[in-house]
Image: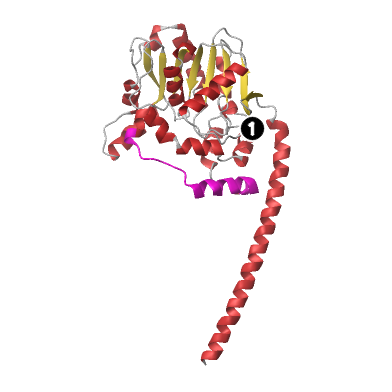
Amino acid sequence: MRDKLKNVIRKMLKIFKKILVILLGLSIILLFITTIWNKAICMIEDKELSKVGTEVNVNGTSIRVSVTGEGKKTIILLSGMGTASPIIDFKPLAQKLSNHYQVVTLEYAGYGLSDDSKKDRTNKNIVEEIRGTLSQLKIEPPYILMPHSISGMYCLKYMSTYPEEVEAMIGIDSTVPNQLKYESDFVISNGLYYLARFMDKTGLTRLSYLPGVAYLQDMEACGSYSKEDMKKVSALFNRKSISKAQYSEHRLFRANCEELYDVKYPDNIPVLFILSNNSCELYSKQSVKNGYHITWEGLHKEVISNTEIQKIVYLDGEHYLHWKQSEAIADMADDFIQGKNYVLDEI
């Protein structure tokens, strides 16, 4: 009886092994097919993506930029962390600002159509990348920096290091370093990073569409982008859901914040923070949940050093304020740059 049972088990194990080998073989064949298919799709998409911005060589890295408008003053648009295509993301805002200003939209290494980079994404390295790009474009300072989200921190480093190169800063729901004193870390694990890279290369990201579905749906739903714009953004996300440079940026986020803890903006440079009402509400709720009584607006007041020229205003909307509020942001920016008091007095 025992011998018969052993024979049955052996046969079942052999069958199970054969099934595993067959499944493994089919998986390899499927991955080979999806990889070739993904490369073919990328080649087709490249024809349209090549029309997005122009290339600038910065220390051997191709950085993609868009330059519009011909005003005497230059506004530099800098994106939030993980933005799939900063040039398209800022397109509605850049178009409105271009009526009065020269506008440069810069895609960091690892973003949009810029080359990826193994170089650590420290505050210093990112600031030098911005400066190097503007130098290659032969656009002379001083600049008006206009960062969204995490780029607010890089602008603080820029202004602290090279204050003579910055005329003003206008932050769109921008990050401030001290916020990490009250927030837990969110670090992408090595395993998740390599899984994402594997999915990008083999076309599984394109097939699954899961990681960026909310981001892409919200962007499309705002109504500010054409179908062609959304196709390009989706194409870029599908081939680069996370890059080496973005991974480094995630890993160094705490260190970059800690470097700038309690640093204020230079007191001789005008600063306008345009904050999302939704972010203010959500941050207050999350702060209380974590045992603090810190507000989003309070954190921004901490980095103000001169209340005469550094102000806070508010707009209805989500964190990506410029998706729906590009016209209002452009008007606020213009009023601020021109020194109109009715914006400066709104705190």
Task: Give the tally of numbered discs.
Answer: 1
Residue 324 visible in the current orientation:
no
* Image height of 62 relative to 167, above or below: below
Q: Determine the secondary structure under disc 1.
A: helix
Residue 316 visible in the current orientation:
yes
User: Quadrant location of residue 310?
Assistant: top left
* Image height of 177 relative to 20, above or below: above
Residue lying farthest to the bottom in this orientation: 1
Placement of the C terminus among the 4 image quadrants: top left
Residue found at x 62% / y 36%: 236
* Residue topped by disc 1: 227
- Front residue (pair 224, 191): 191
* Image height of 154 relative to 331, above or below: below
Q: Identify residue type, mark 1.
A: Lys
**Looking at the magenta stretch, what is its main secondary structure?**
helix
Residue 178, given in percent of the width and then of the height, sits at 34, 29
Are there few (<14), some (14-19), or many (20+) residues within 10 Å of tag 1?
few
**Is residue 204 magenta-colored?**
yes
- Front residue (pair 8, 136): 136
Residue 213, given in percent of the width and then of the height, sits at 54, 42
User: Quadrant location of residue 113?
Assistant: top right
- The structure's colour scheme is secondary structure
Q: Which residues are magenta?
A: 181-207
**Is residue 59 magenta-colored?**
no
Residue 235, given in percent of the width and then of the height, sits at 64, 38
Residue found at x 64% / y 65%: 23
Residue found at x 59% / y 27%: 88
Residue found at x 47% / y 37%: 250
Residue 157, given in percent of the width and then of the height, sits at 43, 22
User: Quadrant location of residue 99?
Assistant: top right
